[in-house]
Image (spheres, rainbow, N blue to C red):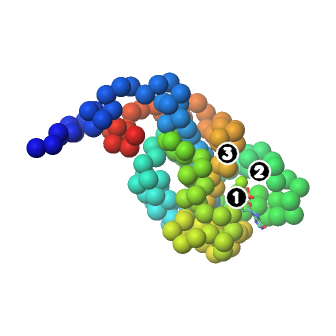
Amino acid sequence: MGSVSSAAGPTAVCAEAPSAPVMAALKERTFIAVKPDGVQRGIIGEIIKRFEQKGFKLVGMKMVQASEDLLMQHYIDLKERPFFPTLINYMSSGPVVAMVWEGKGAVKTGRVMLGETDPAKSSPGTIRGDYCIDVGKNIIHGSDSVESANKEISLWFKDEELVTYTSCAFSWLY
Ligand code: IDP
Ligand code: MG
């Protein structure tokens, strides 16, 4: 008979507690938002499902009718682009679902899960590849670097809106 893992997790494989830098890497956070078209088209649940099933941990979530001011700060790097006014109008056209997901490589893997900015260039199996057609209605936002994730999280969430807890799946994921 081989060894049997307990319901609490495969402790025999993970006898030592991870070092502080390893733990920090497992707590990387990304800002994900279901855009107004994703909300209106009923794709919120599918997006949450994909991040949950991947193994990322949800540490913050709320519905927001974003102000123009918030959106202009969020997209400040794009303010000179010709589509900027349309983008602000699109993003303020209805509520968005703002979320923070945590886990190893959450930023980079999150972007892979989203697909390309242009849904037409996004592979099937990605969120944009599966659920939308047009670059101006691409249903989801995801941070493009750890630095922008930190900026976006602090723009959209107060510290007390983010929770700290241990997921029972942790030792089965890492
Ligand atoms: P990203 O969302 O994949 O990071 P960005 O280049 O940061 O892409 O652009 C932000 C958002 O601006 C896009 O998700 C999309 O909604 C919109 N956008 C980008 N390029 C265009 C365009 O050429 N026409 C219209 N909207 C665009
Ligand atoms: Mg971007």
Whether residue 155 is visible: no
Q: Secondary structure at mark 2?
A: loop
Disc 2 and disc 1 in contact, CB within 8 angstroms = yes
Residue at 44%, 53% (x, y): give it.
54
Beta carbon at label 1 within 8 Å of ligand 1? yes
Q: Relative to 93, is 76 on the left or the right? A: right
Disc 3 and disc 1 in contact, CB within 8 angstroms = no
Q: Amino acid at mark 3?
A: Ser
Q: Position of residue 47 (x, y in %)?
A: 50, 59
Quadrant location, the C terminus: top left
Q: Secondary structure at mark 3?
A: loop
Number of residues whose C-alpha sits closer than 10 Å to that of mark 2, classed few (under 14), some (14–19) or many (20 or more): few
Residue position for label 3? 145
Q: Position of residue 63 (x, y in %)?
A: 56, 50
Residue position for label 2? 75
Camera-side mark, 3 or 1: 3
For residue 125, above or below residue 112? below
Q: Amino acid at mark 2?
A: Tyr
Beta carbon at label 2 within 8 Å of ligand 1? yes
Q: Position of residue 121 (x, y in %)?
A: 66, 72
For residue 61, above or below residue 22? below
Camera-side mark, 2 or 1: 2
Residue at 34%, 37% (x, y): give it.
171
Q: Amino acid at mark 1?
A: Met
- The label on residue 91 is 1
